[in-house]
Image (spheres, rainbow, N blue to C red):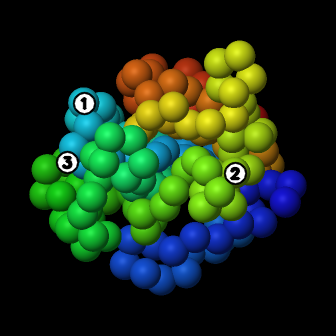
Amino acid sequence: MSTIYDFEALSINGKPAHLSTQRGKVLLIVNTASACGFTPQFAGLEDLWKAYRDRGLVVVGFPSNQFGGQDPGANDEIASFCEINYGVSFPMMSKVDVNGAQAHPLWQWLTKEAPGMLGSEGVKWNFTKFLVGRDGKVLKRYAPNTAPNALKDDIEAALAG
């Protein structure tokens, strides 16, 4: 796999989501959780989605229960939580593993393309973010504690590129 467009996932409602349909857009891929100290970042992610979607940004959330069991609910419960508590309208995918042998292929690719601190590939916690350019290649990886609004300059640059 050479670009993000080579992957597919299941949407949070169980329908196939082919990332090739996002060709030419800038993507912000985030592993999310409903009961994490970083969960309020959903609001900031929604703000980015609203501010930049008309210019070609797509925010995509991937719930994961791999860190502290902080997203144990079923997909419908996660979707409801996100919408009710944070007004999430950006695309959410079905819950996945982002690390280990059962990690979703997209996450295996993302972590190889943009390793973390000291070259580690594993995702360390919820709300790790990956910015993908219009060419489908990973531009940058962001730590969980990086607030969504801190990504604006990089998003602007990616949208302009």
Considering the numbered disc 1 on the image, is that residue within a helix, a strand or a loop? loop
Q: Quadrant of residue 118?
A: top right
Considering the numbered disc 2 on the image, is that residue within a helix, a strand or a loop? helix
Of pointers 2 and 3, the one earlier in the residue sequence: 3
Q: Position of residue 133 (x, y in %)?
A: 71, 42
Q: Quadrant of residue 158?
A: top right
Which residue is tagged 2?
108
Residue extending furthest top? 118
Considering the numbered disc 3 on the image, is that residue within a helix, a strand or a loop? helix
Q: Is 58 placed above or below 149 here?
A: below
Q: Position of residue 13 (x, y in %)?
A: 37, 78
> Given the image, on which type of amino acid does mark 1 rest?
Gly
Give the residue drawn at x 43%, y 81%.
14
Query: Badges 3 and 1: C-beta atoms under 8 Å apart?
Result: no
Q: Nearer the viewer, mark 3 or mark 1?
A: 1
Q: Nearer the viewer, mark 2 or mark 3?
A: 2
Q: Which mark is residue 37?
A: 1
Q: Which mark is residue 86?
A: 3
Of pointers 2 and 1, the one earlier in the residue sequence: 1
- Residue 105 can be seen in this image: yes
- Residue 160 can be seen in this image: no
Q: Could you tell whether 143 is left or right of 134 in the image?
A: left
Give the residue drawn at x 73%, y 56%.
4
Of pointers 3 and 1, the one earlier in the residue sequence: 1
Q: Is 19 placed above or below 114 here?
A: below
Mark 2–mark 1 distance (CA, rounded to whole Å): 25 Å
What is the tally of numbered marks visible in this picture? 3
Image quarter hosting the N terminus? bottom right
